[in-house]
Each structure stands twice: as C-alpha cells, then as structure tokens.
Image: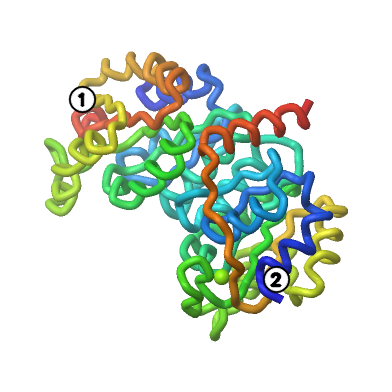
Amino acid sequence: MSVNDKIVSDLVANQIELVTTVPCKQLAGVIDIVEASKDIYHIPANKEDEGIGICAGAFMGGKRSAIIMQNTALGVVVNTLVTLTQFYRMPLPMLISYRGELGEPVACQVEMAVHTKALLNQLQIPTYHFHREEDVEELDKILKYTFMCNKPVAILTDASFWKGY
Amino acid sequence: MIRSDVLKELIPVISDQFIVCNIGLPSQELHLLDDQPTNFYMLGTMGLASSIGLGVALAQKEKVIAIDGDGSVLTNFGTLPTIANNVADNFILLIIDNGSYGSTGDQPTYAGKKTSLAAVARACGCENVVECRAEDTVEVMKEALAGDKMTIIVCKCESGNIPVPVITKDPVVIRDRFMTTLAARNG
Ligand SMILES: [Mg+2]
C-alpha cells in the first residue's frame, strides 16, 4: 500500500467522513485519493480558516472531519484554532505538509518552516513529525488520540517523508 | 429597521430551528431575545458563521440557518464559492446586511457602497439568492424554510445597535447543548 493510500485508509478506518483541503504540491497525491474515496466527502476550501470552520460544523453535526493543508497556513489559522477549535473543545486532525525542511528548493518556504514548530508549541497543539516513511504507522494512533482528547492535533510531513518533491 | 428588529420579528419563525449565529452583537442580541439550545453562538472567529453552518448542514439532516453579517461575509469571501459548489439543501444563509461593521462601532462596509452581496453570491454560483427589505425578511425566511433548496438571503436593513450584555455561557456548554439537541432531533 502506498503512503497516500495508507493515510486515507486510516482516515476512513477512524470514521472520518469529511475532509477539507487546501492544496500543496507535496499533498497532491493524498488529496487525489481523498477526492476519489467513496467514504469521504471532500470539500476543497479557499482558505484554511474557512476549512476549519467547516470541520467544526461537521463535528457539531455528528461527523468526524479532518483538514489537509500546508504549514505556511499556520499563519492564517491561529485565531480560528484558538477561538473556535480549542475554545469549544473540538477534535481536529491536521495533516500538514512541512515545507521548508531538508530538500526544499524554495528559500521562502524556510521562513515559515522555522516558525512552524514554535507556533504549534505556543498554541499547545500536540504535534507529530513524520520524517521517515515508516512514521506513517503512527497515524492510526494519532487519530484515535485526537478524537479521545477533543483537541486539534498536528501531523507534520516533511520532504524526506514524501521522498522529495 | 435595524438588525435587532429583524431578529425580533424572525424569532417566532426560527426559534426551534438550528442556528449558527455570527460573533458579537448578532449572537448577543439573539441570546438576549431568545436563548435556545438550538442556537450556536460564535464567541470568536469573525467570518466563519457560514462555514460552520455549511459544515453542520452537510453532516446531518435537520435544517440549519447561519445568521451572518455583511462585514463577516466580506471577511470570509471565499465561503460563497464553497457554499455554491457544495450544495446542502437543508442550509439557509441569512446575511443581515446593514452596510456596517455593527459590533465594532458601525464603521461602513463596502456592502453598503458599490458592492452587492447578492450579486456576488450569484456570481459565485449560488442558485437561490433572495435580496429583500428588512420588513420582508420573515416572509422570505418562511418560504426558505418551507422549500427544500439551499437559500442565500440578503436582508438589507439599517445600521444601528441596542445595548446588550456579552454572553458569559461557557463555550463547551453552548456547543454541547447544540450538539445534543441536534443529535436527538436527527433521531
Ligand atoms: Mg454589518
């Protein structure tokens, strides 16, 4: 099973029925599989805070959801994570491409990469970092942990994990 | 008519409906006028009422009304294409358009100038957009509730506020009673 198939099958196995995405080159494969999945309703969002709003609504409507986005978007969603997801205690798995790490060809991406873990740490968001392919084996447990504790949880996936660009 | 007048007139029609209400004065007014477990008050996150409402509508069967404002829709403009392209026929978006940022002191918005939110919603692909006078909002809402078609209502009203207390209810209480009531209504 490919890494992308494994990620989506773990989402489905954890009853995640709605996934909202804002694309990143690294996430193109997993987004394709989300779109093709008959078990997941896929909503492309125009901005990540909008996507998190949709996820919050889906949760209140009784469906589990997740967001797929790029780490640069942490600069967009701080207020939403704090005053919606955390304030109302809602679960939210965030599968995040960790641009600006080893292998990155675009210098500007490094500018947000250096803030990524610091921001997540400041927001007290449990954070997991997938660097080697086998790290994906933890995804199932991370998802169960997210819905156990009703918090946003970040899964950073770097270029080494995705085997380059 | 100002927003609180519109809300007051709407209450007999929407009291037992599931509502996601915009941050600030709209939520505070609704809370003061008719607090219900079916009301989800946004205490933060300006702009996301329509996104949250769409999420609730897509996830279950009951009708959902998002009460939004012109300033908030302008803040989260990307919501209109998303709503248009992910049709939930149990979803009603009521934009109370008073042409101002009411909660922050009635600073004018572009919706009160050259920009028509109804025209924007149509251009984004929303198929059932109704712009109405404040006085006609109850009738338009009744029709929207009676139909099974996703509807965007742009209610043009005057700018102005009434004094209202802030909401001190715990956010988790607000969220939990909304979810519990919604789950029970879905059976
Ligand atoms: Mg306004």
CA gap between label 2 and label 1 equals: 51 Å
**Secondary structure category for the residue under label 1:** loop
Under mark 1, the amino acid is His
Quarter of the rendered structure image containing ligand 1: bottom right
- Which mark is in front, 2 or 1? 2
Residue B123 placement, left or right of A148: right
The residue under the point 30% across, 45% down is A74
Reading the image, the residue beneath label 1 is A131
Front residue of A13/B107: it is B107
Q: Quadrant of the N terminus of chain A?
A: top left
Residue at x 52%, y 58% (from the top left corner): B24
Name which quarter of the figure residue B96 lies in. Answer: bottom right
Q: What residue type is labelled 2?
A: Cys
Q: Where is residue B140 in the image (x, y as percent from the top left)?
A: 82, 65
Viewer-side residue, A135 vs B177: B177
Question: Which of A5/B174 is in front?
Answer: B174
Count all numbered tags in the image, as a single digit: 2
From the top left corner, tell me how far across and down residue A10 is, in percent. Answer: 45, 19
What crowding class fits label 2: few (fewer than 14 Cα within 10 Å), some (14-19), or many (20 or more)?
A: many
Residue wearing tag 2: B155
Viewer-proximal residue among A35 and B127? B127
| SS for callout 2 | strand
Q: Where is residue A103 in the image (x, y as percent from the top left)?
A: 13, 38
Same chain assignment for discs 2 and 1: no
Q: Visible in this render: residue A158?
A: yes
At x 78% / y 56%, what residue is drawn?
B11
Badge 1: how crowded within 10 Å, few (<14), some, or many (20+)? Answer: some
Q: In this view, does A16 lie above or below A42?
A: above
